[in-house]
């Protein structure tokens, strides 16, 4: 029969999450590594949700992400050429 260890993740004092983790997993990678992996996962998940909200807002506003991206990329390239590659625009 496998034993489980409870880990507590405290983040911004908003919530405590207890997870049941198998003893052999804790022994193999360690409690701190498990905590870091869970925190990293939650941070990425928050970013994913924010990106989805931005995407939805842009759609609702009628903005074309691809067009905006191409325009921003072109402007950044032109600025970079002027600042760092002036020899490319010399005749």
Image (tube, grey):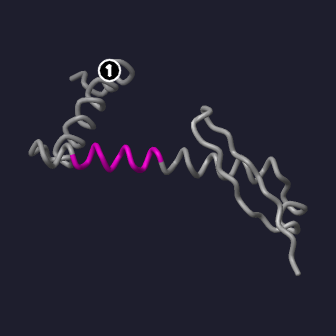
Q: What residue is rendered at 78% in x and 57% in y?
A: 6
Q: Quadrant where the C terminus lies?
A: top left
Q: Position of residue 76 (x, y in %)?
A: 29, 30
Magenta segment boundaries in residue numbering: 46-56
Q: What residue is rendered at 36% in x and 24% in y?
A: 85
Q: Position of residue 37 (x, y in %)?
A: 68, 52
Q: Position of residue 35 (x, y in %)?
A: 73, 49
Please say whether residue 47 is one of the residues in the magenta stretch: yes
Q: Position of residue 78 (x, y in %)?
A: 26, 28
| Secondary structure character of the magenta stretch overall | helix
Position of 47 relative to 22 (above/below)? above
The picture quadrant where one finds residue 27 is bottom right
Q: Nearer the viewer, residue 76 or 5?
A: 5
Q: Nearer the viewer, residue 17 or 63?
A: 17
Q: Nearer the viewer, residue 10 or 47?
A: 10
Position of 3 relative to 76 (above/below)? below
Q: What residue is rendered at 16% in x and 45% in y?
A: 67
The picture quadrant where one finds residue 2 is bottom right
Please state if 40 lies on the left or on the right of 20 as rendered: left
The tally of labels here is: 1
Q: Residue furthest top?
A: 83
Q: What residue is rendered at 69% in x and 45% in y?
A: 9
The picture quadrant where one finds residue 43 is top right
Element marked by disc 1: helix
Please say whether residue 67 is one of the residues in the magenta stretch: no
> Within 10 angstroms of label 1, few (less than 14), some, or many (20 or more) residues?
few
Q: Quadrant where the N terminus lies?
A: bottom right
Q: Which residue is mark 1?
A: 86
């Amino acid at each position: 029969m496998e034993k489980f260890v409870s880990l507590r993740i405290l983040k911004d004092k908003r919530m405590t999450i207890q997870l049941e983790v198998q003893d052999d997993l804790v022994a193999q990678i360690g409690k701190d590594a498990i905590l870091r992996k869970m925190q990293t996962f939650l941070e990425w998940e928050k970013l994913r949700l924010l990106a989805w909200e931005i995407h939805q807002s842009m759609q609702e506003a009628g903005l074309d992400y691809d067009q905006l991206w191409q325009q921003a990329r072109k402007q950044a390239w032109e600025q970079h050429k002027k600042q760092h590659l002036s020899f490319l625009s010399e005749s």
